[in-house]
Amino acid sequence: MKILKLLMLAAVVMIVATSCSHNSMRVKRGKAPKMLVLYYSQTSNTKTVAQEIATRLHADIEEITLVEPYDTAFQATIDRCKADREKGITPDINPLKNNVADYDVVFIGYPIWFGTYAPPIATLLDKIDLSGKTVVPFCTFGSGGLESSVKDLAARQPEATIRQGYGVRAARMDAVPKEVEDFLARNFFADGKFDMPEPFPEQHPVSADEAAIFDAAVNGYPMLNAKATAVASRTILDGDGTEYLFTAQDMRQDVNPSDSRLTSEIQVYVIVEKGKSPEFTKVVR
Ligand SMILES: Cc1cc2nc3c(=O)[nH]c(=O)nc-3n(C[C@H](O)[C@H](O)[C@H](O)COP(=O)(O)O)c2cc1C
């Protein structure tokens, strides 16, 4: 009888231990994990996020640099990317100083270019092996692209465990410190309180008031010409704000029908903080 009780106790301990390790993740238990933040940044937005993450986690940090940097002019960068794509090449990067093999967790940061990670990250991902590592993508963008870039990353490094990523609009860099703190806490990389919003309810057709919120959020962003059709909302910031998830029709004339990612129906996240104007946080295509 005593042995049976002991066996049952051992089983309970094992179940609890297994569920704990799921929740608090390998990285926080036992030996401290080694973390590296790798990033490419052309105009410093992604660098800001990278530094925020590395500082909060006391992680090593390294910038990916190009053998031949892009021209700082926007159009020249676009032209070079197009020419490289036609040749089927990505830009050469300088050798990393850190050895990725030495790390348990690798954060990879980039600006979104043409709907996915910027080409220097494609070069990087072909050079390093992330098999068995925990990989945390983060990015900055004009309107969005986290989701599609994470899919591309997973396809390029199928043996890596890719965690939920963090993305922020270039126009919302002020939000980075708080959002990164929440993001790290939510992903169990750091201690801290974080806002876990309730799930969105089902969407309903937009009312005139909701359409006005959508228009106010996207007006002023020239790359986005869309009309909201459906919406759901939830409370955020302990009641000090509302987040909306809009479905909208992309009205741009240049939506490319041959690119399956650029469908005309898009999802647009909008936040309205008490006393502030509506702003969109990301577009998912
Ligand atoms: C060549 C190029 C292509 C871009 N393509 C996109 C895009 O497809 N979607 C988007 O939301 N933003 C796009 N952007 C905007 C950048 O993602 C954004 O400005 C980012 O914050 C830049 O990061 P950085 O300062 O770290 O270089 C593009 C910018 C450049 C220069």
Image: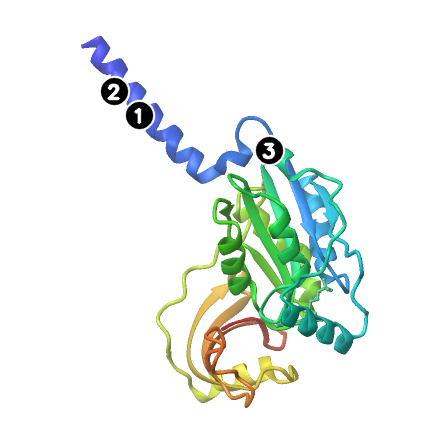
Which residue is most to the front?
87
Q: Which is nearer the N-term, disc 2 or disc 3?
A: 2
Tell me the CA gap for discs 1 and 2: 6 Å
Quarter holding residue 40: bottom right
First reached walking from the N terminus: tag 1 or tag 3: 1
Residue on which the image places disc 3: 33
**Residue of label 1:** 12
Q: Measuring from the top left, give residue 171's x and y in whole percent.
A: 69, 71
- Residue 166 position, x and y percent, is 58, 57
Could you tell me which residue is drawn at 71 percent across and 60 percent down?
91
* Rendered residue at 62%/82% (across/down): 223
Mark pair 1, 3: CA separation: 27 Å
Say if 34 sits above or below 166 in the image. Answer: above
Ligand 1 under 8 Å from disc 2 Cβ: no
How many discs appear? 3
> Where is residue 127 drawn, in percent x and y?
64, 48
Give the residue displayed 50% in from the left and 34% down from the top: 26
Amino acid type at image mark 2: Met
Q: Which mark is residue 8?
A: 2
